[in-house]
Image (cartoon, rainbow, N blue to C red):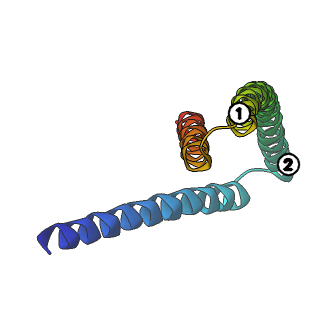
Amino acid sequence: MTNQNQNQKEENQNINSKDFLIGSLIGGIVGASLALIFAPKSGRELRSDLNQGAHYVKDRANEWKDVAYEKGSEWRDYAKEQSQQLGQTVSERSQDLTSKLKETKDTIQEKISKDEDPEKAAEEVAQAIEEAAKAVEEENDTNRS
């Protein structure tokens, strides 16, 4: 119970800190805007300052756009590479599984084609099926890891 109360207090502090930072940022922007508007400058100087600020914001936005585009390209390439590797792994695993199932089928047919005791043949077939099922489970476990 004590840990839960502590966690709630920490969450409340984090939320309060975030709210404070957001409020400070908004207050700073509003304060700077009002300072520019009500500063004892001529209209020409004020327009010049606002124009410089707008250019600065525009330049920063372009820089952020370029960074975002670059990161997006990196993530796209990474995702493409990972999907190719995953596809190759799935293909290899399915080929292995297919060959194991074919071997099991051949073993079953071989056991059936021999004129052995039907009960013994059925037991061997059941054992072969269990082995194949275990192999499939092992393959699934390694694919999930």
Q: Given the image, on which type of amino acid does mark 2 rest?
A: Arg
Q: Residue at x 55, y 44 (%)?
A: 120
Q: In the figure, 39 relative to 110: above or below?
A: below
Image spot of residue 117 (x, y percent): 59, 43
Q: In the figure, 142 relative to 34: above or below?
A: above
Please count the marks in the image: 2
Q: Which mark is residue 131?
A: none
Residue at the spot of label 2: 47
Q: Residue at x 63, y 38 (%)?
A: 116
Choose the circle earlier in sequence order: 1 or 2.
2
Q: Name the quarter where the N terminus is drawn.
A: bottom left
| Residue nearer the viewer, 6 or 58 | 6
Image spot of residue 40 (x, y percent): 69, 54
Using residue 5 as the reference point, say whether residue 23 is left or right of it: right
Considering the numbered disc 1 on the image, is that residue within a helix, a strand or a loop? loop
Residue at the spot of label 1: 114
Using residue 72 as the reference point, say whether residue 28 is left or right of it: left
